[in-house]
Image (cartoon, grey):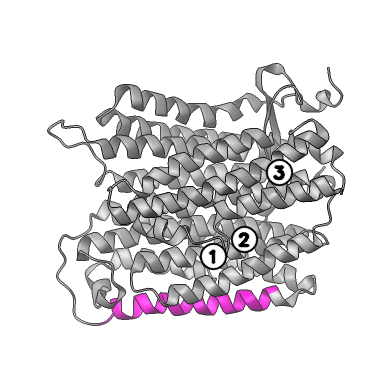
């Protein structure tokens, strides 16, 4: 047995970690094999199973107070590959397993096989890619090897990009190609960094690397390359140019998944890189740079959202802004306030996922019912579609950071940590971002709740409105998370390990 291999013994229940990856991957293969109407049925049948796996993994982590580990094939790293799940992994798995079926139930209207049995390409592609995204995200959240995480990132890209252009329109094809270009360049930078680390240390396992890495030029170069590549995939300003056209032109259900979940995959890996792989490096300068870019994203993304004429574009640019909040945790990663900053960053990822999914689904209902999504033409629409606009407004409440909402809890924790750390500038940026978010939300709701009731082309289905409303309520209810939830997030966090044992 190689040195350190004993540290990779599988924990009780660790074999469960393989199932969230294998089950949707098997669903992809079955969908290709059976095709047609069966792809939808397979996807919708397996999504509750994924939720069960996610809850079971979270329960095992909570009961043990330690991360779960599973060694594939019994070969411990560096020869083999280990899967790991900590508190952060578990909550992201649960979030994914809730948003995916919501998007699937919403999408049945648009991507169902016709009753006459005629098969269409778009439904088969949509349901197959949705399962591929879930498999890739599960691998990202559970993977413990940097190269296999690269593979998961590429699977995620090649599953997500086609969702943008399912309708085949020229503008959606252009948006998908731009997305693909940014993603491929990001993957190239990430892979170069991985190659440098492997050449220097002979392993890519996260735990082994964290024990061996030293602050030397090759490591700093690798860290810079990998971070730049992941930032391009996350669409952090100024690498955001691909996101608004991609998310705004995709079908509403795809936009909800892309904005709520897909961009979180690369952000998750940035957290893993700096918090788990590179603890030996000083994070003062990199953290300040990431937070400065995040601040620029908050201000620029919000300002751009204020200028948009289409509702889906406004929501897409607000994603650019909200992504910026995720990076305010990095300069606060050391010190007695680090646990609050980490919890605030994770809470922002969760609340944004639910809120943005709800808003994109609501925007899709508005566009279908009115025949357009022009903000200037929304006068009185809130009276005709009260449940839809309630979901949109509750999601916006979380984006603004108003209580009670998950966005408020996230921003409060980040602001508290920044004030305790004496880094007031981040708190000022968050306050400004909240005011700007209120401005672009007012642009939508003010005309929608006044004026004459418009004639709808077709009223939205109540079941689809309820899906969007449920997601928006989830974003709000995160504000009431108990202290035990934040303690759960600390399980497996390197800086929190001593305190939890």
Marks 3 and 2, how far apart at CA:
23 Å
Residue 24, which numbered label?
Answer: none
Question: Residue 392, can we see it?
Answer: yes
- SS of the residue at dot 2? helix
Magenta span includes 434: yes
Among the two numbered marks 1 and 3 on one chain, the one whose residue lies closer to the N terminus? 3
Label 3 environment density (alpha carbons within 10 Å; few <14, some 14–19, many ≥20):
many
Q: Quadrant of the C terminus?
A: top right
Label 1 environment density (alpha carbons within 10 Å; few <14, some 14–19, many ≥20):
many
Depicted 135 relative to depicted 419: above or below: above
Q: Position of residue 292 (x, y in %)?
A: 68, 69
Residue stretch rendered in magenta on the structure: 426-450
Q: Where is mark 2, residue-wise?
A: 326
- SS of the residue at dot 1? helix
- SS of the residue at dot 3? helix
Magenta span includes 234: no
Q: Where is mark 3, residue-wise?
A: 193
- Looking at the rendered image, the disc whose residue lies closer to the viewer, 3 or 2, is 3
Among the two numbered marks 3 and 2 on one chain, the one whose residue lies closer to the N terminus? 3
Q: Is residue 305 left or right of residue 126?
A: right
Q: Where is mark 1, residue-wise?
A: 322
Q: Are marks 2 and 1 in contact (CB under 8 Å)?
A: yes
At x 30% / y 80%, what residue is drawn?
A: 447
């Amino acid at each position: 047995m190689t040195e350190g291999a004993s540290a990779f013994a599988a924990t009780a229940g660790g074999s469960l970690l393989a199932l969230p990856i294998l089950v949707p991957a098997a669903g992809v293969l079955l969908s290709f094999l059976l095709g047609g109407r069966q792809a939808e049925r397979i996807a919708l049948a397996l999504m509750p199973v994924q939720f069960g796996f996610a809850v079971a993994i979270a329960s095992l982590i909570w009961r043990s107070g330690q991360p779960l580990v599973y060694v594939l094939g019994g070969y411990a790293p560096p020869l083999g590959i280990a899967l790991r799940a900590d508190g952060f992994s578990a909550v992201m798995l649960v979030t994914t397993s809730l948003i995916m079926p919501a998007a699937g139930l919403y999408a049945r209207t648009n991507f169902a096989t016709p009753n006459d049995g005629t098969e269409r390409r778009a439904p088969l592609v949509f349901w197959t890619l949705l399962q591929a995204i879930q498999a890739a995200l599960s691998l990202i959240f559970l993977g413990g090897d940097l190269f296999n995480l690269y593979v998961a990132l590429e699977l995620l890209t090649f599953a997500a990009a086609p969702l943008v252009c399912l309708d085949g329109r020229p503008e959606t094809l252009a948006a998908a190609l731009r997305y693909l270009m940014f993603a491929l360049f990001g993957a190239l930078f990430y892979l170069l960094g991985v190659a440098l680390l492997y050449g220097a240390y002979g392993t890519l396992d996260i735990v082994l690397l964290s024990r061996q890495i030293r602050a030397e030029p090759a490591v700093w170069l690798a860290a810079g390359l990998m971070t730049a590549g992941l930032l391009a995939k996350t669409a952090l300003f100024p690498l955001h140019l691909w996101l608004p056209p991609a998310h705004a032109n995709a079908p509403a259900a795809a936009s909800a998944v892309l904005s709520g979940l897909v961009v979180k995959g690369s952000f998750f890996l940035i957290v893993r890189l700096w918090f788990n792989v590179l603890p030996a490096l000083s994070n003062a300068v990199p953290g300040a740079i990431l937070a400065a870019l995040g601040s620029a994203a908050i201000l620029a993304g919000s300002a751009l959202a204020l200028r948009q004429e289409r509702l889906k574009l406004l929501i897409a640019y607000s994603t650019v802004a909200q992504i910026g909040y995720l990076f305010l945790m990095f300069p606060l990663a050391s010190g007695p306030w680090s646990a609050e900053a980490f919890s605030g960053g994770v809470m922002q990822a969760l609340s944004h996922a639910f809120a943005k999914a709800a808003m994109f689904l609501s925007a899709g209902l508005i566009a279908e019912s009115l025949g357009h999504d022009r903000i200037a033409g929304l006068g009185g629409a809130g009276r005709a579609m009260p449940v839809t606009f309630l979901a949109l407004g509750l999601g916006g409440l979380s984006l603004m950071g108003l209580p009670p909402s998950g966005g408020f809890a996230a921003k409060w924790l980040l602001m508290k940590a920044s004030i305790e750390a004496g880094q007031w500038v981040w708190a000022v940026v968050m306050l400004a971002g909240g005011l700007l978010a209120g401005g672009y939300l007012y642009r939508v709701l003010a005309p929608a709740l006044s004026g004459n009731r418009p004639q709808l082309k077709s009223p939205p289905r109540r079941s689809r409105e309820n899906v969007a409303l449920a997601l928006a309520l989830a974003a709000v209810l995160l504000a009431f998370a108990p202290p035990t939830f934040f303690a759960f997030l600390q399980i497996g966090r390197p800086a929190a390990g001593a305190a939890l044992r």
